[in-house]
Image: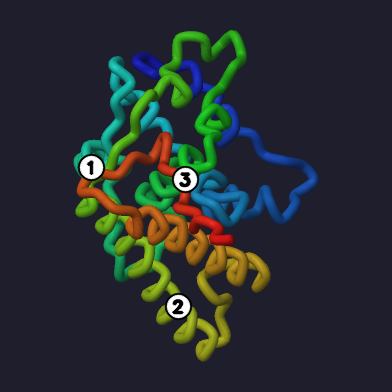
Amino acid sequence: YFGLQSSDLWILRQRMSILWPYTENSYRRMYMGCWGITALESDNGLDAVRCVRYNLPADGQLDLGEMLERLKKDRWNAPCDVKLGCAHTSPMALAEIVVKYLDGDPGSLDYDEEWAAEDNKFRSVTSFTASRASLRELRDYLADTLKYARIRAERQIKAGELPGGWFDPKDWDGWQKHMEGLIHRLDGVLALEGSTLELAHPPAPTVPELTM
């Protein structure tokens, strides 16, 4: 436990807790490392959030490209080969963090309990910028992950296996829609003008003037 922030200990407690009697969610947690379709409902996603939280800049100036590079170099959070079509990855978690900022809700990533008082806070970020190249890289990783996951699922279905490794087909469908939603949100930011894009306070969409 040495060197861990308080929120890291909470994550460890979450992982070690096993529901009884066994439910579908506890089965997922033990054998898939997840208990939902989003990255924030998975071990891999929480690891990525922990990494980003630990490296939040003291000056409040967060950069997407720098966070991507940190994840790539981290032995626990380096993105898996996109051709594996992994369900939950660190880039997916980063995309979900981006959406939290786009929606003005980064505080939901923070823990406000007393045991987390010393943790870095996502709500303390005053600027979250991204170059077009870094945002495009993140977007393309998600799109390719979805593409290869679907290719793998087709083979699994033909072999009589569960598509995507999900125990419930509804979760497989829900995961695909969630990925499509993340890609759509990133495409929306890429449609904005400028070489550097602001994610914490994105500009409002242009509204055509009414003519009388």
Query: In the visual, does 40 lie left or right of 152?
Result: right
Secondary element under disc 1, as helix, strand or loop, is helix
Relative side of 21 to 124, left or right: right
Q: Residue at x 61, y 71 (%)?
A: 173
Which residue type does callout 1 highlight? Answer: Gly
Q: Which residue is farthest front?
A: 212
Residue marked by disc 2? 150
Name the mark nearer the viewer: 1 or 2: 1
The residue closer to the viewer here, 149 or 55, is 55
Q: Tell me the mark number nearer the camera, choosing from 1 and 3.
A: 3
C-alpha separation, residue under disc 1 versus residue under disc 3:
23 Å
**Along the polypeptide, which appears first: circle 1 or circle 3?**
1
Question: Element under label 3?
Answer: loop
The quadrant of the image that shows the C terminus is bottom right
Indicate the amino acid at tag 3. Answer: Ala
Q: In the rendered view, does 53 fall on the left or right side of 163?
A: left
The answer to whether residue 73 is seen in the rendering is yes
Identify the mark at residue 204; answer none if there is no mark: 3
The label shown at residue 151 is none
Residue receiving disc 1? 65
Against 73, is 162 above or below? below
Q: CA distance from mark 2 to mark 3?
A: 34 Å
